[in-house]
Image (cartoon, rainbow, N blue to C red):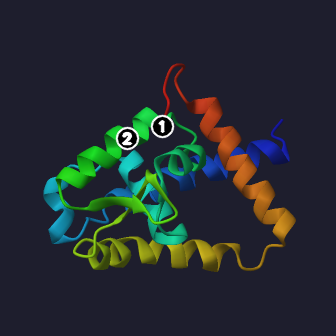
Amino acid sequence: MSTAADATVRELMLVMPRLVGRAKRTPPPEQLRDLDLAPRHLSLLSLLVLDGAMTVSELAGKLGVAPTTVSLLVGDLSRKGVLERREDDTDRRRRIVDISAAGRPAIVEWLSPGARAWRHALAPLTDEQRRMFVDTLLRYEQAVQPSGDDR
C-alpha cells in the first residue's frame, strides 16, 4: 500500500535528477569556464553576490565549513582573479573578501537566473513555509551526505 509520503518521495525522485541535470547544463560564462569551479565555489560566489563582501570567518559561518576551507577557496579564486581581498577600513587586521570588479558582471549574469527562479518558486509561500522548505532540503542533504564530507 502506497502512502501520500511515498507518492511525494516518488515525485521528488523524478524531479531532483532533472533539476541537477539542468544546473549541470548551464555552462559558466566564457570568462569562468577554465576555472574548474566546484559546487563549493558556487556557494561562496552566491553568498558574495547576494550578501556582499564579508570576512573569511563570516563566509565560513554562512557556508557551514571551517575558516581554513574558505581560506583555501578564497586563495584559489583570488589567484585566478575572480575574488579580491582588501583590508577592512574599520579594523586593518581583518581582510574583506569580495568578487573582483572584472569578474562580477560574468558571475552575476551566471547566477541571476537561478536566484530569479528561486524567488518565483518561493513567492507564493509564507515565511514559515519557506523556512520549512529550506529546512527540509537541509535535512535531505544531511541524510544523503557521506560521512566525513564537509560539503
* For residue 84, above or below residue 4: below
Q: Which residue is mark 2?
A: 71
- Image check: 4 left or right of 13? right
Q: Residue at x 71, y 79 (%)?
A: 123
The foreground one among 50 and 131 is 50
The foreground one among 55 and 114 is 55
Q: Which residue is mark 1?
A: 67
Rounded to the nearest angstrom, the CA distance separating label 2 from label 1 is 6 Å
Residue 39 on image: x %, y %? 39, 48
Q: Estimate how packed mark 2 is, as few (under 14), some (14 to 19) or many (20 or more) residues with alpha carbons within 10 Å.
A: some
Mark 2: amino acid: Ser
Residue 9 on image: x %, y %? 69, 45
Mark 1: amino acid: Pro
Q: Are marks 2 and 1 in contact (CB under 8 Å)?
A: yes
Q: Estimate how packed mark 1 is, as few (under 14), some (14 to 19) or many (20 or more) residues with alpha carbons within 10 Å.
A: some
* For residue 101, above or below residue 68: below
Q: Which image quarter holds the N terminus?
A: top right
* For residue 149, above or below residue 51: above
Residue lying at the far top of the rendered structure: 147
Q: Residue at x 24, y 54 (%)?
A: 78
